[in-house]
Amino acid sequence: MSDGDITPPNPFGGIPFLNDMMRAMGQQGPLNWDLALQFAQLGAVGDTPDPEPDTKTRLAYNALADIADLHVRAITSLSTGPHDRHTEILTSTRARWAQRTLSDLRPLFTNLATALGTRDTPAETPDDPMAAMLANLTGMMAPSMMGMSIGSMIGSLASHALGQYELPLARPHASEILIVSSSVDSFAHEWEIAEDDMRMWVLIHELASHAILHSPAITDGLTALIQAHVSAFRPNPEALMDSMSDIDPSQDDAMAHIQSMFSDPMVLMGAVRTPEQESMAPVLDAHIAAVSGYIDFVVDTVSAQLLGASSPISEAVRRRRVNVGNSSHLVQQLLGISQSRVQQQRGRAFIEGVVEREGTAALPQMLTAAPFLPTPNEIDAPGLWLARLETEK
């Protein structure tokens, strides 16, 4: 084996069937995308129906989008689609949403898998033959474990997603927006909200997100920072064994701890947060808070115009955003995105502070270039951000 060959030796080389299986696993790249897709779709559908939307529903959404689009453009002065026309609204199943999201986020998860497969120093081969075999087997299984973990997380996200922008991330498919129509209608029924009102609110949120997240500051700044955060993970092969050694079998909740551990991709993948990520976190948090706060401001303003100021939808959706399942929070943790209640309040306070001082006209300037996104100090003191804008004009 050459010095540059880091492929672990096959512990089943003498057993033809297992040898072929292990060779196939070793050739699948850093992440098994077939498994990721299967687990994503399984998690998205679960045990509940995932109906295919009919043409009538899609046409109804696009008709409502014509109204929402005019108001979003008026407030943001941003384009929501080509030729002064909003982006096409596609009604989708949960399974298709999962497939599209996995495809859209593939570069991020590929970088993550590559980072977790990186060793700063060559791994030492254990003296114990059995330990050496298990270490090699773990290395070969890593892409499959990664695929199952990533797929499960995206599936969980898909199980409750209402629209394409469940996470404040730009999507490469700028020509269309996916709406999970059955989930929207289910949410409306659960909260006793008029169906057309709920659909309109989701469209306002998606069109506002689409316009804001495809601005230069996001594509050149925030997206690049998230890529850097993901690529800065480093592996800890002992993470799983260390976690298991902390469990006391005599405790009543030992089994619950084990189940929680094996459902945590951060443990299974051995993802260790690095000092580089710690230094990025304040900046990433500030950017996410400001961008999410701006989206919420636009949504609230347009919703008040079209649905009335007393509409309960925004608060209901934001509570749900905070209370989503553990896997959804893990996606955010891996990508460095925080949508906690504290972050929501922080972003809202920043936007309100800017509007109180300068009105709404100052807000779009934040999106014109990456350097205009607020710093950690500025997100908590909007006056500082406005003062910097004045000096850089």
Image: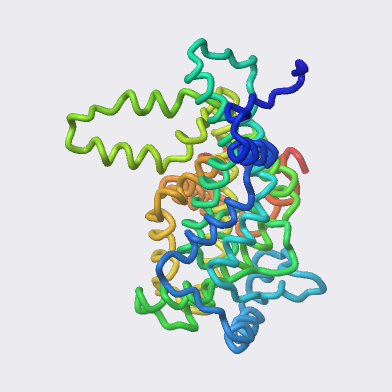
Q: Nearer the viewer, residue 66 or 95?
A: 95
Quadrant of res 205? bottom right
Q: Is residue 300 visible?
A: no
Q: Is residue 291 left or right of residue 268?
A: right
Q: Residue at horizontal 48%, vertical 49%?
A: 339
Q: Is residue 102 visible?
A: yes
- Expressed as whole percent of the image width and height from the top left, the position of residue 7 reads 68, 27
Colour approach in the figure? rainbow
Image quarter in which the N terminus is found: top right
Q: Is residue 366 left or right of residue 164?
A: right
Q: Residue furthest right?
A: 83
Q: Residue furthest top?
A: 127
Q: Residue at horizontal 62%, vertical 65%?
A: 208
Q: Residue at horizontal 56%, vertical 22%?
A: 275
Against 103, residue 3 (above or below) is above
Image quarter in which the C terminus is found: top right
- Expressed as whole percent of the image width and height from the top left, the position of residue 202 reads 53, 71
Q: Nearer the viewer, residue 260 or 207?
A: 260
Instruction: Count the labels in the image.
Output: 0
- Expressed as whole percent of the image width and height from the top left, the position of residue 390 reads 71, 42
Q: Nearer the viewer, residue 25 or 388?
A: 25
Q: Nearer the viewer, residue 12 or 194?
A: 12
Against 168, residue 299 (above or below) is below
- Expressed as whole percent of the image width and height from the top left, the position of residue 274 reads 55, 25
